[in-house]
Image: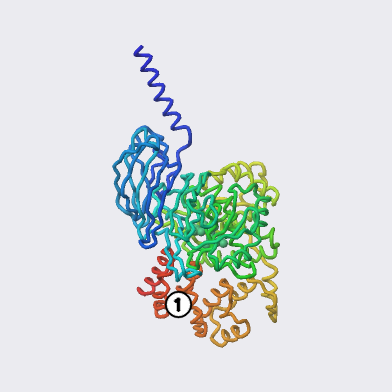
Amino acid sequence: MTIIYALTAILAIFMTACLKNTEEPPLAHDIHSYANPNLARVRHIALDLTVVFEQQSIQGTAVLTIQQFERDAKQLILDSRALQIDETEISPDGVKYVESRFSIGKADKILGAPLQIDIAPDTKYVRIRYSTDPTATALQWLMPEQTAGKRYPFLYTQSQAIHARSWIPLQDSPGIRVTWEAKIHVPKGMTAVMSATNCAPGAADCRFVMDQPVPPYLIALAVGDLAFQPTGMRTGVWAEPAVLPAAAAEFSDMEKMLEAAERLYGPYRWGRYDVLVLPPSFPFGGMENPRLTFATPTVIAGDKSLVSLVAHELAHSWSGNLVTNATWSDFWLNEGYTVYIERRIIEELYGKRRAEMEAVLGYQDLQDELKSRPPADQILHIDLAGRDPDDAVTSIPYEKGALFLRQIEQVFGRQKFDAYLKDYFDHFAFQSVTTAQSLDYMRAHLFASNPVEAAADKIPVDQWVFQPGLPASAPVPVSDAFRAIDDAKQIDTRGWSTQEWLHYLRGLPEHLGAARMEELDKSYNLTASANDEILQQWLLMAVRNQYEPAYPRLEEFLTTVGRRKYVKPLYEAMDLKQAAPIYEKARPMYHPITQATVDSILAAKARK
Ligand code: BES
Ligand code: ZN
């Protein structure tokens, strides 16, 4: 009898152990997270949060559903940054909770601090009562004056790359996917929206749900005076009421973009695709939060000339959100694939001429970036040991990554490559993949069946992914439209697109002199340009040539627009004397991410 009991017990232990270990392969180590996902992993997050504008703080509870892979996990380890933890509780059933001990480890400047919570073998739920700090790196709190309507404050989050941990205690690694839900309590008259199912504007007691597993960097929230306008059956725009009509007109091709992407790469799996237009301090062009892209208002040019940003963020619904970089060293899998797809969508909607102009502009960015970056930073599979993953956001993962795929497309032909990509997204749907996994899959499912094309002299894969610079065989995009400008004896700017203007301005010598600047400004009214992409390029030229008539406009631009890609080169080009007083005014309206970038630019200038 005892022997049978013992045997059954051993068998039971053995079976649970097997179950626990074989359900999923262990995750690759992520140097940017403290989590112990192979022992205890977060599967679902339920948030109940109150947004307190007066204190610049989000407060409430996060209930984490966890899965334990080892009997003696003992602790759940989470990532956190500047969070105030008030209480942690554990429960086997999500009904009865008991308080549990927690400790917060030493804080690292880049990673924040590990939050270690004691768990029992039967723990399935961990409830954390917490509040965020005003310094939370994911959050930007805007005063009413910083919004279009000037009446309500505004809050939005930016969780990528490792900022989710500054507003939610969680396992903040792109390899760890979670489903989630949230209740968000906001002041009267304001609306919360999230990267999940949303409710009607102003709806009371909205419950947000994301029931497809996503990496934590895709959890997003915005709160403001927001209204909604549809642009199609599945697409629409959220924005402040004053901005909404222009935004909806600018993005009116969104439904067509969605359909084009589906024709190329298979069904859109996220239900709706909406865009939220943020106030101008948003530090990025766009952020691909699922179901709800966050976007800068600087792309509203009035002529749809900058909507490749929407194509880009939409493309992430396949590359990035469906198939996700497993660690930040694999970031090129997100961005390189996305830039490639973005240009395919642009070609479908607006033709090859436009797509090629954008490819050439991207290629020029890449060439500039390659000149200014050390060899180690030119590698697609980048080593980020000791570094902030935000530092790896250069043209290299974007444009070198896209160029690599462009070469594969050229060698295999579109038909084969399109079919391959569609299959790749299906195969890895809702999973996070490493560079090695993606290359293995490519070798097995594209190269193996086409050995002639896959020869290393045609596609030097290892050189593309693991070496600096570009392979000698790298494609060089060309644009007939740009060539016509380069070859013209007398330029005729009538009917020029934004892209043609950018090419023309970027092609002018760096030192033009004030007289030539004045002449250009007289002819083309560039200081008054309403297109922020052209204006930024022009202001850069104004700084380089000390063209003073543009200085008031420069100051106005820098004190209203916080998009890092725009402001960074301008501060770099100015001397400290010119930059410091402008920055003093501008800094409070910048997002912490942009502030950090400009802080270090000015600090470097001060040291010189
Ligand atoms: N996901 C990125 C933005 C990002 C990357 C934020 C890394 C934080 C860390 C987004 O999809 C993106 O690439 N945005 C670009 C625009 C795009 C058209 C190239 C941007 O913001 O400039
Ligand atoms: Zn992107």
Judged from the image, the quadrant occupied by ligand 2 is bottom right
Check disc 1 and give the amino acid type.
Answer: Met
Q: Residue at x 60, y 48 (%)?
A: 271
Quadrant including the N terminus = top left
Total labels drawn = 1
Residue 333 visible, this angle: no
Q: Nearer the viewer, residue 531 or 478?
A: 531
Query: Does mark 1's beta carbon lie closer than 8 Å to ligand 1?
Result: no
Disc 1 secondary structure class: loop
- Left or right: 561, with 497 as reference point: left
The image quadrant where one finds the C terminus is: bottom left
Tell me if mark 1 has few (under 14), some (14-19) or many (20+) residues whose alpha carbon lies within 10 angstroms of its own: some
User: Residue 227 location in percent, x, y?
Assistant: 55, 61
User: What percent of the width, then of the height, locates residue 550?
Assistant: 52, 82
Is residue 434 visible in the rendered structure shown here?
A: yes
Which residue is situated farthest in the top direction here?
1
Instruction: Name the residue rendered at 57%, 67% in the picture.
Output: 299
Whole-percent x, y for residue 189 in the image: 47, 61
477 versus 422 height, above or below? below
Front in this rendered view, residue 32 or 243: 243
Q: Residue at x 47, y 75 (%)?
A: 573
Residue underneath mark 1:
574
The image's colouring method is rainbow
State the image coordinates of residue 263 (x, y, percent, origin top left).
Answer: 68, 50
In the image, residue 467 sits, relative to residue 63, either above or below, namely below
Q: Where is 475 relative to 169, above or below?
A: below
Asked whether 247 or 437 is in front, the reply is 247
